[in-house]
Structures are given as structure tokens and as C-alpha cells.
Amino acid sequence: MSMLLFVLALAACGKAETNPQATSNLEQNDAVSQNEKASNESTTETRVYKHFFGETKIPVNPEKVVTLQYASHMLKVGLKPIGASSHLLETTDADFKGIEDVGSADQINYEKIVSLQPDLIIAGDIEKDVYDKLTKIAPTVVVPWMDYDVFGHVEVIGDILNRKQEAAAWKTDFDEKMKTAKDEIIGKIGEGKTFAIYRVDPKQFYVYGVRNMGFTLYKALGLTPPALVQKEIEKDPNLWAVPISLEVLPDYDADYVFLTLLEGEDTTKRLDEIKRSSLWKNLTAVKDKHIYDISMDTWLGYTPHDIEVQIKEAVQLLTQDK
């Protein structure tokens, strides 16, 4: 079951693999890219950075960066990537305008990356063979997605880019905005309330921990989860979600519930069955009409930009008159 949770938790970030077609001319470009790297290294101050695949000599102040995972985080510390994976650019946010698409997570466009002539590549969860190909283009640093929460991601990206002060400034500004948002929520609903996030899949029911949707409520806004969820978080500070059977749902009761579904007809049917049960009808949030439907598309994202959108929606939902 732990492996299932890990796979599901990675759904929002993707995993890069080799694309044979996209790399057909990669070897032909090796000599060119190596020459470019040698030329750049002769004029650029560098330092050694330790990461998942070892130690890599990177520019002290990188300027032309391609990222396969951390575009939002880079923007928050003040450096726009010159290229990013396709899934990172599926947004209408103006901040991402002008960033070149370097292919999907499982079909990296290596030739496109070569053409951008980056001085650094920052990746998330990739295989060693992919890493080896990227290092032939530019120095590459790998930051595993599950090793950090959003705050940690921004801090690490700030370190890699030599923008620690910018990362710290973003966190300070973020905390101030979160305090304002929380005060608005508490001002409307009062102190001492608990909040839960339920996810319904065709054959499973999850109660979220502190990643993805849970991060927004519990870490960003500082709201209180159900007691059993809090105990699980204390055991695993990086807890994604807890799978539960319907029989124990009352043990995860809360004053306010955010409800999301994995899209599909089977999920809709399962939710209808759950809603007809006495276990569901007797939940505090159901009786008080404090159930809020949220979109998986909006709430599964786990970047600084995603969190900001989710927080705005959370404030709107929790402060509206019902």
C-alpha cells in the first residue's frame, strides 16, 4: 500500500524517461555542446554542488537554466527558466509566458534543450540514463520531488541558483499572506475548528495528510486536521494521505470537509453510494452543510503558484455565506 501511495503522490509531478526519437541526434550534438560547456566554464565562476547523483560543478550565478520540474520555484526566487517541461507550462499565468517547451516528462526534447544552450539544468525525479544524457548538454542537478515540501523546494532551488536571500524573502512574504488569509477564515468561522480533505477513487477512499491539498490547509494556512490525521503527520511529517475503509470514516470526522474525486463514471457512482450511507449522513460537516467540492485539477498541484491559487479558493469557500 505504501508503494501505491508513493505512485499516486507522484501523479502531480511526473517522471522523466528517455525518448528515443527526441534523442536521435543527441550524440551528433555532443561535441558541440561539450565545446560550448568548455567555453562557458573558462569564463564562468563555478562551485561544486552535491545532489542526488553526486557532485556537479555548476555556475555560481546561473543565468540560462532549463528545468524539468521547478519552474514555479525558480520564478519565486526571481529567475525565469529559459525552458521547462510541458506539464509545467499548462497554465495561463503570465509569469510562465516566454518559457520554451522542452518536451513532456516522459518524452524530453533533448535537441530543444541543446538549442537553448543552458548553463544549468535542474531536474526532479529522473533515471540515471536520462541524467547522463542531460549532463552531456549542461551541468545537471537532480532534486528528488518527495524529499521536500513546497517550502523546502523553494529553499533548495534558491540555494542552487545562489538566490538564498530571494528564497527567504519569498517565504517571509508568503507567511504574511497566509496569516492574513487565516485571520480572514477564523474571523468568519471562529476558533477551534477542524478540517479534513477526502479523496474518492473508484476503489479507494483517502484522507489527505500534509502534501498536495493537505499542505495548503495544514502547513500554509495552519488549520487543524482531524486528530487521527494529526497523529499520522507526527509519525510521518511528509505524509501524503491515509487510505481508509468507509467503516472508520467517522473517526476522521471534521467540522469542515474538502471533497475531491478522481474523474470517471466509476468514481461518481462510488461517491453516490457513500453519500447514501448513514456513516456519511452522520458526519458533522455533512449535517452542518460544510462540505466543499474542489477540483483535482486545481488542488493536486504542488508548486508555489498552485498553492496560492488553492489558498484563494479555500478562503473564498470558507468565508462565503451558506
Image (spheres, rainbow, N blue to C red):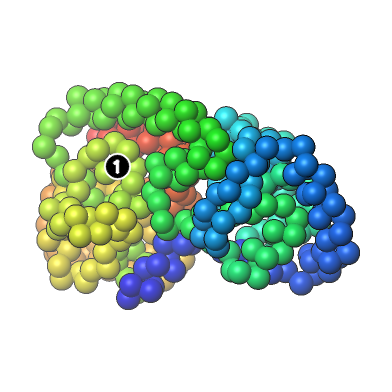
The N terminus sits in image quarter = bottom left
Seen at 71% across and 64% down, the residue is 133
Q: In this picture, is 298 found above or below 175?
A: below
Q: How many marks?
A: 1
- Judge left or right: residue 127 versus residue 216: right
Q: In this picture, is 21 found above or below 158?
A: below
Q: In this picture, is 293 found above or below 43?
A: below
Seen at 70% across and 59% down, the residue is 134
Q: Is residue 135 visible?
A: yes
- Judge left or right: residue 8 versus residue 61: left
Q: Is residue 92 visible?
A: no
Q: Secondary structure at mark 1?
A: helix
Q: Nearer the viewer, residue 239 or 32?
A: 32
Residue type, mark 1 in image: Lys
The C terminus sits in image quarter = top left
- Judge left or right: residue 227 versus residue 219: left
Give coordinates of residue 81: x percent, y percent: 66, 40
Seen at 87% across and 55% down, the residue is 32
User: Mark 1, residues whose alpha carbon is within 10 Å: few (<14), some, or many (≥20)?
Assistant: some
Q: Nearer the viewer, residue 114 or 231?
A: 114
Give coordinates of residue 66: x percent, y percent: 67, 47
